[in-house]
Image: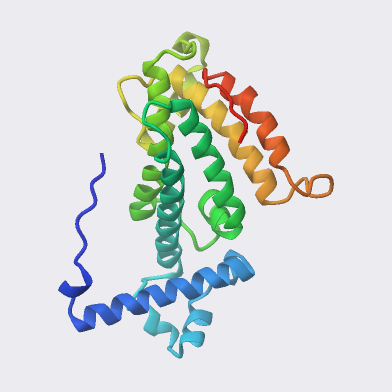
Amino acid sequence: MHVEEDKPTAAALSRRERVREATAQEIKQIARRHLVEQGPPGVSLRAIAREMGMTAPGLYRYFNSLDDLLSSLTADFFTELTESVQASDQSLPEDDVDGRILASLRAFRTWALANRAEFALLFGPPGPHQRRHEGGALEAGQRFAAIFFALFDRLLQERRFEVPGDAELSPVLCRQLEAFAEQTGFTTENVSNGAMRVLTSCWVRLYGLVCMEVFQHLSFVMADMEPLFEAELPDILRTVGVSYRAP
């Protein structure tokens, strides 16, 4: 389990450190606004520096590159998303696994719709100035995924559904599923390639629904995709033995 080191409190920081932290936060606030207004291509160190009355090289004292800035934003957005989903999850009793899963999935959709540009940065293909998640961004992404992994692990412990055996999966798919489990940090004793196969199938369907809505791919016929989202949930969750409840 990842444990974050305690960060110094504001009182423990020197005046110079407080000023530096405040400047870094201002840079990220402006970058987020540019991201929302113009998309990832609209985020540039030069534009941010101009707005702050700084030189572009001056920003390199805070972020080594645009990629470094986007990575820091990615970690922040994953943390924000995690807190939103956790709040919904923890609002229900510990033993209400079905209710917690539904609440978490709905919270994921709600955050995505309220933060479309941020969602695209987290889950869309990486841009020319963006590495795939690593370092702090990867760790923040794993903490987000851990919410759903913990709930899915409960379903495995309770034997809610039949898990396919490795013999039912191709060797190539098995290697991909193992890599996925390792990359995302889902490596409990209950996890098998068959379990990962079921999990990824559910995730692809749910993620696809949210993406279709976030990027408005069906806006020409559906101004509101919530009815479709709710209609799909029972079918998807039935495969893992979860009972559907209307919102």
Q: Which residue is depicted at the point 39% across and 40% down? A: 90
Q: Is residue 32 left or right of residue 179?
A: right
Percent position (x, y) of residue 12?
15, 72
Percent position (x, y) of residue 240?
52, 20
Q: Which residue is depicted at the point 37% across and 21% down? A: 191
Up-down: is 236 above or below 38?
Answer: above
Q: Quadrant of residue 156?
A: top left
Up-down: is 129 above or below 197?
Answer: below
Q: Is residue 221 left or right of residue 161?
A: right
User: Does the image show residue 6?
Assistant: yes
Up-down: is 231 above or below 22?
Answer: above
Percent position (x, y) of residue 234?
63, 25
Percent position (x, y) of residue 118?
54, 58
Q: Is residue 197 left or right of residue 231?
A: left
Q: Which residue is depicted at the point 55% across and 21% down? A: 243
- The residue lying toward the viewer, choosing from 70 and 9, is 9
Up-down: is 125 above or below 37?
Answer: above
Residue sticking out furthest to the right: 221
User: Does the image show residue 124?
Assistant: no
Residue sticking out furthest to the bottom: 53
Which colour scheme appears in the figure? rainbow
Give the quarter of the figure containing the N terminus: top left
- The residue lying toward the viewer, choosing from 135 and 105, is 105
Q: Is residue 26 left or right of residue 119?
A: left
Query: Total of numbered circles in the picture?
Result: 0
Give the quarter of the figure containing the C terminus: top right
